[in-house]
Image: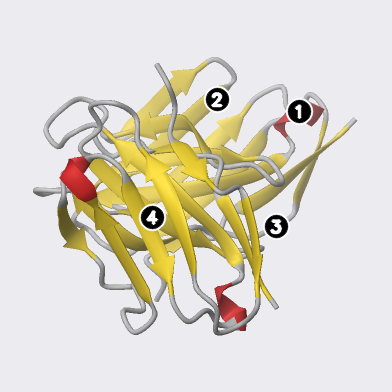
Amino acid sequence: EAGVAQSPRYKIIEKRQSVAFWCNPISGHATLYWYQQILGQGPKLLIQFQNNGVVDDSQLPKDRFSAERLKGVDSTLKIQPAKLEDSAVYLCASSRPPGLLGTGELFFGEGSRLTVL
Amino acid sequence: QKEVEQNSGPLSVPEGAIASLNCTYSDRGSQSFFWYRQYSGKSPELIMSIYSNGDKEDGRFTAQLNKASQYVSLLIRDSQPSDSATYLCAVALSGGYQKVTFGTGTKLQVIP
């Protein structure tokens, strides 16, 4: 079974520039999560999709961050304009559909490390 | 009050000892509980999940859950240097979807 794919692995940008991250979840996983992990902290949920609908984006800074999940599969997270405090690892994770055994058990991609200068 | 709280450590134990990692959570509606291991520079990986009160054992790992006390723990027996990592406690609410909230993690150092 192929894992969660993310790209790019690393990105360095100047503040006020834009950046986009891509994620392809495990096949059949209906739930997709984007987390932000700042060095020394635990992952913080930015947005959660169920198929192609948003179920939680309460911690997403909507003035600069946006995310979409086309056709309930791939997802893109965009930051525009970036700030210095956005420097972090952006983790994509997926899990089985609700109601199935193991729902809530997350499988993470390798992450996308963003440095904002 | 943080939703999921962990001592950040570092927790240092000698090789072969038992490492005990603790976590408390604030929402009594939480139904699913997880422990993830994260090596430096890597992504979290799931090592244990527990859904009901009591103990769950898997090899050298034992997860313990006490919902009345809102407390989850992870015991690692016969600790090895390869167990040195940050251990993240995660909690999910029940309901139509599973919002998974993480603690800040406890850094474990196993001393050879």
Dot 4: chain letter? A
Asked whether, in this view, residue A78 is left or right of residue B100, the answer is right
Residue placed under numbered mark 2 in the picture = B61
The Cα atoms of the two marked residues, 1 and 4, are separated by 28 Å
Spatial CA distance of label 1 from label 2 is 14 Å
Q: Circle 2: is it few (<14), some (14-19), or many (20+) Cα within 10 Å?
A: some
Marks 4/2 same chain: no
Residue that badge 1 annotates: B82
For label 3, the crowd category at 10 Å Cα-Cα, with few meaning under 14, some 14 to 19 and many 20 or more, is few
Q: Chain of mark 3?
A: B
- Amino acid type for the residue under numbered disc 1: Ser
Count of number-bearing discs: 4
| Label 3: element kind | loop
Q: Which of label 4 and label 3 is nearer to you? A: 4
Residue at 61%, 70% in the rendered image = A87
Identify the secondary structure beneath mark 4: strand
Q: Which residue is mark 4?
A: A34
Tell me the number on the disc at residue B54.
none
Q: Give me the residue at 25% from left, 32% from top.
A: A29
Q: Is residue A81 above or below residue A28?
A: below
Q: Amino acid at mark 3?
A: Gly
The kind of secondary structure element at disc 2 is: strand
Quick one: label 3 or label 1, which is nearer the N terminus?
3
Return the residue at label 3. B9
Task: Give residue A49's position: percent from left, percent from top.
Answer: 22, 52
Compute the Cα span from label 3 to label 1: 17 Å
Residue B50: name its quadrant: top left
Amino acid tagged 2: Phe
